[in-house]
Amino acid sequence: AENEADVVVNSQGKLTELNIRLGSTVSKGQLLGKVDTKLQELNLKASSLSQEKLAKDYDRYNELYKGNAATEANVTDVKYNYENTKVQVEQIKQQIANANIVAPLSGTIVRKNLEEGEFVNPGTVIATIVDVSKLKATVMVSESDVYKLKNGAAVNITTDIYPEKVFKGTIRYISPVGDDAHNYPVEITLTNDAKAEVKAGTFIRVSFDIKGSTNTLQIPKIALVEGLKNPYVYVLNGNKAAVRKLVLGREIGENVEVLSGLQEGEDVISSGQINLVEGSIVSIVK
């Protein structure tokens, strides 16, 4: 999913409301629940009364000061107490506002961790929202191909779920740094189709429109003795096994592209090779 976010509590107390369930569709800013605020509301009422009283005291002392019936210190003290109470009122109002649990983005509730009536602390994750209106995927592209790609270019996306449908995606990011096998992460985005919605986590195939592609030498991945990180294979040299260190390119389904280390026509051992060493006698079983 392009956008995913946790619904987090910002205050401490008991969950008095929680109006969500798995699969609920919510909008950004929507009220999802509330933490108990009875104590804060009582504190707000008391502080508001104090603020009103101090406001009147401040006006009265100002008048007395103008008539030389009160000192400047009296006025300053009352003003300080009044301003301090104003700050307390705003702080309590903010605490009450923090008790409201709102959706950080529009989407679907895919995870619900708590129920109404449970006690929570600030930072507690109530639920998770996922927006699948736009999806993203990262694929690895070989060095020989990545220089032919451009940000913003269109790509074709297919799935086993909708075998007859081709989705249109867009290249959003091409990494400037490759891995040890000279493959580069490329991120693509897909705007979801309401008539054939793709779920987040679905396996996809991405086809890039790369001009000038040529035939490539490929071998099955299962032939690699230690996998992609240390790519080498055994080939048949007469009746003996010989090691070939490889430089790999793209992963193409169950195969992998070989950039160097093998010649076309060499017999690659793809079964039982884990037990071989250089020079082992090999018998081919048909």
Image: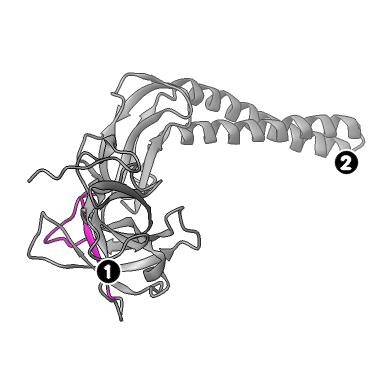
The label on residue 20 is: none
Q: Position of residue 151 (x, y in %)?
A: 41, 72
Q: Amino acid at mark 1?
A: Thr
Q: Magenta region's main secondary structure?
A: loop
Colour mapping: one colour
Q: Nearer the viewer, mark 2 or mark 1?
A: 1
Displayed quadrant of residue 13: top left
- On the question of residue 140 being in view, the answer is yes
Check disc 1: other Cα within 10 Å, few if <14, some if 14-19, many if 20+.
Answer: few
Q: Amino acid at mark 2?
A: Lys
* Residue depicted at 47% across the width and 32% down the height: 10
Tell me how far mark 2 sits from mark 1, CA to CA: 95 Å
- On the question of residue 69 being in view, the answer is no
Residue span colored magenta: 191-209
Q: Position of residue 77 (x, y in %)?
A: 82, 29
Q: Are marks 2 and 1 in contact (CB under 8 Å)?
A: no
Residue toward you, 7 or 86: 7
User: Is label 2 in a helix, a strand or a loop?
Assistant: helix
For disc 1, the marked residue is 216
Displayed quadrant of residue 79: top right
Total residue callouts: 2
Residue toward you, 146 or 163: 146
The label on residue 66 is: 2
Relative to residue 72, is residue 31 drawn left or right? left
Check disc 2: other Cα within 10 Å, few if <14, some if 14-19, many if 20+.
Answer: few
